[in-house]
Each structure stands twice: as structure tokens, then as C-alpha cells.
Amino acid sequence: MKGKYWAKFLAIITVLAMLAGACGDDDDEVSGEGFTFGMILVGPQNDRGWSQAHYEAGEYLQEQLGATMIVLDKVNGADRPEITVDQVVDDMVAQGAQLIFATSDDMKDGIELGAANHPDVPMVWSSGDSAWADGEGYRADLDNLGNEMGRMYYAKQIAGCAAGLTTETGNIGYLGPLINDETRRLANSVYLGAQYCWSEVRGEDPAALTFSVNWIGFWFNIPGVTLDPTQVANDFFDGGADVVISGIDTTEALVVAGQRSDGGDAVWAVPYDYEGACEEKPEICLGVPYFNWGPAYLEVTKSVIKGEFAAEWNWFGPDWDDLNSLNTSGVGFVEGDGLSDDSATALEEFIDGLAGGDIVLFTGPLNYQDGTPYLTDGEVASDHQLWYTKQLLEGMIGASASN
Amino acid sequence: MNDRMRRIGLAVLPIVLAAAVAVLLLLAVDAPPLRSFNLVWNGSLGTTNKLADTLLTWVPLVLAAAGLIITFAAGLWNIGIEGQIVIGAILATWVAREVPGEAYFIIPATLLAGMIGGIIWGLLAGVLRVYGKVNEIFGGLGLDFVATGLAVYLIIGPWQRAGVASTSGTDLFRAEVWMPEVGGFSWLALTIAVIAVIAVFFLMRGTAFGLKLKAVGANNRSAFLLGIPTDRYMLAAFALCGALAGLAGTVQATAFHHKLVPSISGGYGFLGILVVLLAAFRTAWIAPIALFFMALSVGSTQLSLRLGLDSAIGGVLQGVLVLFALLAGGVQAKRHLGKRRVAGATLVES
């Protein structure tokens, strides 16, 4: 009697679950026909870097959903001094945009104003922290503005490991942009990856690894204002480095390494930002860490179409089962031809370690550069500690702040 | 009568030609020309909101151009105007950020600070030119770099904002020290620009100072021999231009961006040089020409948004129009020259 009751109950539950599953599938087949979204880019849409990655995510949305994209590129004070981000938001809303992506940290003021001016239109500020309740820039009043960002620190650790496995001189240079929480976080990630693979994988003396950071002052070269990245890259190589890792938007590190390689030097480089960045000089490229915004943007867009949008801060990660999947992995790393076969094997093991959680590099004890504790013994960095990185780590050479 | 018709024809011809080329260009990129012109019009001057936006960008450009009228009159290529705008914006920012007080005190103080900044930077170029014998083009260019470098340093250094948006400029100024608006129109900025243009117009046309300045520009040596203290006049020209440039920088910081950004000058200094050249150094013409430029810049955004055109198309259209205006100017100048030659030849023959 009792058993029968349970069997019935289980059967009902199973049917319900299947129904729910079927409904879930239906939900996933959201159509974006007639749905319009705006994409505001800070650089040219074909910059082979940050902005192109966003633009391609927009194309991905068009493909996946049949939605329509309105795009405006080069929205920055130098290229378009005559317009502001909130004006672009006004224009896009007037043109029927039902969701707007503002894709640079630089757009903070403009997109926050735009979101306040159009409280009924969902918006996303990528790389921002305005929707993070624990964040320092939280704006509880803007419930139509969410944030998206990729956990690039994983791919940067992989980049660092590739450099640590490859370097012959034990000297690695990091070509940094300007100094802020994000760029310090990424420089630290590269350092930890390099240090791990240098000492733990290769068994070298940790103290024998030189890791220097030199910040040029901006995301790209501005003649007369920033340091010249070509010059900085050359200085690194002249100073004994044989791998230079780029944290800036442009490919000078790879170009300089290529020239030196052509001249007979054994040197390598790691570019940044764009999946195809190695193409410029594949044979000395160790690989490239890059963003893939498509999957995250697809989720947001679907939620808007379904009327379920909530302003959330989403720090999305790689898909460890398929690191370079266009459909699932938000952060990727493409191995370069410059990586030796042995190194490639070791790098894949390192990636597996990250994936399985056996390797967690942001684990204490770790000190900041001035000796103050960043993570205590055994402490694993929280999102907050990672996001708001206040200094470079002990053992790194270079400035932690710009003044 | 006939001559007048011809003159009007010559003035209109480049416009017609430029429009024709613009149409061809638009057709080449598969854009409907009429709709495109309509979009640019509605996106810049055709609606009240857009008109207000466009006029606010017109202010710094026309201020820069008005200042350049003065330095050009003195025969000076004030390339340093970009830096003068930047330093003006930096000092205005300092006041807006650091000085406590009520709006009715702070807003005039930002304007004053901006002017002082521009004057200092202008005089630096002037002193290098007059006493250091450094050509003002080189000196000015160097000072531009220094000013931009200083702005970037302040933004990512001492005036850095907390969090991720550190390159987007300083924190926004408190709202009460922004330049006031009515119905979206930044009336104070507009008033300043209109007064500046009128003042420069009369300065150059109706005052002894203006006349002597032109003498300095036309022939420095002769002017000096005739008793004009040319050094002082050149310095005065730099200072006046610097003051107007500093005002432009102030408007950029306190009315447009409401903060200091790395590219605070907006390139309006260099664009101002082009405006003055197109206006053939006539003050009355800089206002409409500057408005035309800004309408095209602001309006052509719509070509990207609505028609998906490459963002460079607006710039190319602008370039085509400028080229034709310059060509027309060149043709006219050549005709004048030709006439004079013909007249001279007749004289010799007779």
C-alpha cells in the first residue's frame, strides 16, 4: 500500500520534472525577431582587440536570436569629442533599442546617467561594478543597469605559465597599460602563473625568476604622453628578458619580439584581448588570453526578451570543459605556435589543474609589494579581494601606483 | 550686374560641387543621399534637443577660432592653442574640485581660472617666440604635449577616481558648479561665445589695437620701425588668444564633460585653425562655419546609428567640403591674380 503510494508519487514527480524540463527547453528557444539592442564601443569595431570582441558578440546575438543591432564605435573623447555616452543612449532609445551595452569602464558616468534617464530600458555596463551590492561603486538606485565581466585572471595565469615554461633567461617583462585595480589584478595573475610553472613545474629556484612590470600610462600609445610601448618592449629585451607579455590593447610586444627573433634572438611574446592576435607573428607567439562576450550577452538578452531582466553583476568564467568554445566559454586562451611541444603538454596539465580546482594560485600566504598581507596562510581570495587589487605582489618589480 | 552674378555663381559653385561629390560618395556606400542629409539635419539642428547639444559643442570651437583670429592677425601660428585649452580646463577643474563655496562664486571663479590658465600657457609660447626666438609652431607643439601629459597625469594620478573607471576622467564635479542650463541650452556658455565673437569682431575692426596688431602681422619689421612695440603686441595677442582658449577649456570641463578627461580639448584648437583659414581670417564668418562643422560632426553620428555607415564617413564628408571650399578660395585668388596681371599687361602695352 505504502510502496504503491510512493511509486505513484515518484511517477508524478518524474512527469512533472519532464514537463518542467520540456518547458525549460522551450524557454531557451527565445526569438529575438523584432528585438533591437544597442552596442556602444569605445574603439573601432575592427580593432583586433577589446572593441572587436564586443562587436563580434553583437553579431553573435544577431545570429543566435535574429535580433537587430545598432552599433556606434569610437565613442571616446578623442575620436568623438562632440558626443557623450548618455547622448548616444538617448539616440539608441529613440531608435527603438530595448537593451543597450556600454562596453568600457570609461563609460561609467555616461551609462549611469543614461540608465537614470531611461529607467525602463535595461542596460549593461561591461567591466563595471555598479550592480554589485558588495562593490565599491554600487548604485542601488539603478535597477535597470547590470554589469558583465570575464574572469580574465584565469587566462592571464595561463599566459604567465606559458611564459614561465618557456623563458630561458628566467626574466619576464609585463607591458602594462595604466595602473588601476583591474590592471594590477591581471599583472598579479600573470606573475603567479609564471612563478608556479617556473618553480613548481620546472623545478627552478623561485628567487631566480625576475618579473618586471612597466606601465606605459594608457591602454595604447599616445605619442608624447605615454611611454612608447615599442621602446618599453625593447628595453625589456635589452634588460635580459626573453618573454614579454602584453597587457595593453595593441600588439607592440609581439611586433618587437618578432623583429628580434628575425634577427636571431630567442625571444617570445604573449599578446592580449583578441583571439586572432597571434596571427601577426605566430612562430614566436606563446598564445593569447582573450574575452568571448557572446555567451554572457546572450543570457542577458534572453532575460530581457522574456521580461526577466534583473540588474546583476556577473563575473563570468571560462568553460573548463571547452576553453575555446564560442558558445560557452566567456574567457579563452589560444595556444601559440611558439610554445614547444613539451611546454604545451605542461601547459595543458596546468589548465587541467586550474579547471579541477587543484591549482588555486590566489591562495595565501601572499603579501602585497610593501610587505602587508594580502591573503593569510591558506586563505583563498574572495571576489572582492580579487576585484579590488590594491598593489602588486611581493616579488614583482614595478610600480603599484602612479604617484 | 553681370559681374555680381558671376561672383555669386563662384561662391555657390563649390557648394554645389561639394554637394554633388557628397551625393556620389553616399551612393557609393549604398546610402540614400536625401535620407542621409535629412538624418544629419535632424540629428544636429532639426530638433530642439539636438540643437542644444550642437550649440554646446559649437561654443569651444568658436571661442578657439575667435582667439586664433587675433594671433593670426599678428602673423602668429598659435599651434599651442590646444595646450591653452587644456591648461584652462585643468585650472577650472582645480577650482571646481577643490574650492569650497556657493555656485554664484565658484562658477565665475572657474571661468576666471580657465582664462588665467590659458593666458599663462599662451604667454609661455609668446615668451619663447619673442625672447627665446623659438618659432611659435614648435614651441606651441611642445607646450601642447606638456599640457596633455599633465592632464593625463592628474587624471590617473592625484585626481584619480576610485574603482575601475580610472581612465574616464576625474570624478564628476558637484552638480551645482556645472554651467547652468535652461531647457537643455547652456545659456551661460552660449552668451560667453557670442560676446567673445562680437568683441573680437570690433577689436579687429574698430580699434587702434586691432589695426596695429594687423600691422605687426603684415610686416613686423616695418611696424617696429614705425614705432609699434611689436614684442608687446605679439605677447598681447598670445595672452588674448590664451584667455579665449582657456574659456573654451572651462566650457569643455564644466558644461560638457562635467569633469576633466584626458582628451579635454576635443581637438577644437586644431579644428579652430581650419575654421579661421576657411573664413579667410574674417571674424564674422567663423560663427557660421564653426556651426556648420559641428552640425556635420554631431549629425553624422546618425549615419552610423541609422544607416550603419562606417564612422569615418562623416569625417570624409567634412574633408570633401573643406577641400572644395579651399579649392574655391584658390580659384578665386588665382582669378584676382590673373586680372591684376592682365591689367598690368594692358598698362605696359598702352
Image (cartoon, rainbow, N blue to C red):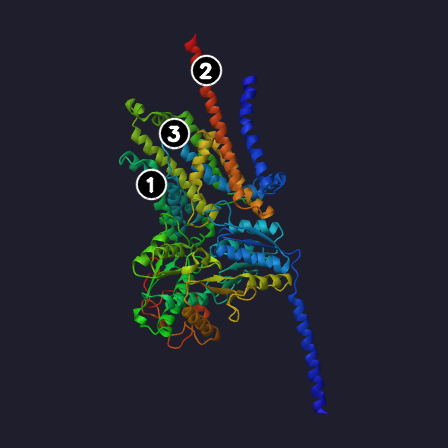
Q: Label 2: few (<14), some or many (≥20) within 10 Å?
A: few
- Give the Cα distance between marks 1 and 3: 20 Å
Q: Label 3: few (<14), some or many (≥20) within 10 Å?
A: many
Is residue A24 at all visible to an observer of this figure? yes
- According to the picture, the residue beneath numbered tag 2 turns out to be B342
- Give the Cα distance between marks 2 and 1: 50 Å
Q: Give the quadrant of the C terminus of chain A.
A: bottom left
Residue positioned most to the top: B350
Q: Earlier in the sequence, mark 3 or mark 2?
A: 3
- According to the picture, the residue beneath numbered tag 3 turns out to be B73
- Which structural element holds mark 2? helix
- According to the picture, the residue beneath numbered tag 1 turns out to be B120
Left or right, residue A374 beside residue A308: left
- Kind of residue at badge 1: Ile
- Give the Cα distance between marks 3 and 2: 30 Å
Discs 2, 1 touching: Cβ within 8 Å: no
> Looking at the picture, how far across and down is residue B171, in whole percent?
43, 54
Left or right, residue A256 beside residue B187: left
